[in-house]
Image: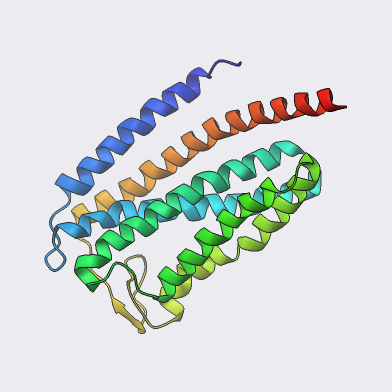
Amino acid sequence: MESKPISLMILDIVSILLLAVSTYLALVFAPLEAAMGAVQRVFYFHVATAWVGMLGFIAAGITGIVYLATKDLKWDIIEVAAVEISLVFFLITIVLGSIWARPVWNTWWTWDPRLTTAAIIELYYLAYFMLRQGIEEPGRRANFGAVYALLGAPTIPLTFMAIRLFRTIHPVVVGSESAEAQGGFNMTADMRTAFFFALFAFTVIFIDLLWNRIRLGNLQQKLEQLKLNILE
């Protein structure tokens, strides 16, 4: 087994430190929001995990295109890694959103346009892995996976724009509020610091996890190839 690169080990440590600092900024440094209280602190990680989830799903669509053009399985490995990580982060987003919604909306879940599209995305990419599990031949599996990831990519901007296109109670905190939106709040300078640092920290964490997952994917591919050689 190949030893982990020094640069990746450093990135692992940096990711942990950034997560610790981001947690401090969200829970201690950022001021208490007047209307929502302490539960508003969930917002910093809620948005950051959503950002990482969407980033990964878009990356999967792009790598899907590259794979279909090149037929190089390394792009399939990157695609799988991106979807797997984003699926977990997007689930965390939904859970954190529910924790925030309970005291603010008086319910854990409502079929708001943003929540509905987020749930559809989570189920769509969960089915991505179910599809791959049903196909044994690597090349054919990669082809189907690439097409599936590519078709799913447009759902990401739709989810982002849902609170601007439809009447919604979901807060609009990035960009100007929609006239149709019923929720929103203004961030102070310290809140913006915690917010943007969380985005940066989770982006670095995503890169770190992606790199580690790609290394694991390469090992899985080598093992699968050995099994195929034995069967032949």
**Residue, x 43% and y 44% (percent of image)?**
203
Q: Is residue 71 visible?
A: no
Q: Nearer the viewer, residue 130 or 197?
A: 130
- Residue 45, image x, y percentages: 32, 51
**Residue, x 55% and y 15% (percent of image)?**
3
Examine the rendered structure and indicate whether residue 69 appears above or below residue 40: above
Q: Quadrant of the N terminus?
A: top right
Examine the rendered structure and indicate whether residue 160 appears above or below residue 61: below
Q: Nearer the viewer, residue 145 or 181?
A: 145
Residue that protrudes farthest toward the front in the picture: 231
- Residue 178, image x, y percentages: 37, 79
Q: Nearer the viewer, residue 130 or 36?
A: 130
Relative to 23, 178 lies left or right? right
- Residue 103, image x, y percentages: 19, 67
**Residue, x 39% and y 44% (percent of image)?**
202
- Quarter holding residue 94: bottom left
**Residue, x 46% and y 80% (percent of image)?**
165
- Residue 150, image x, y percentages: 67, 58
Q: Quadrant of the C terminus?
A: top right
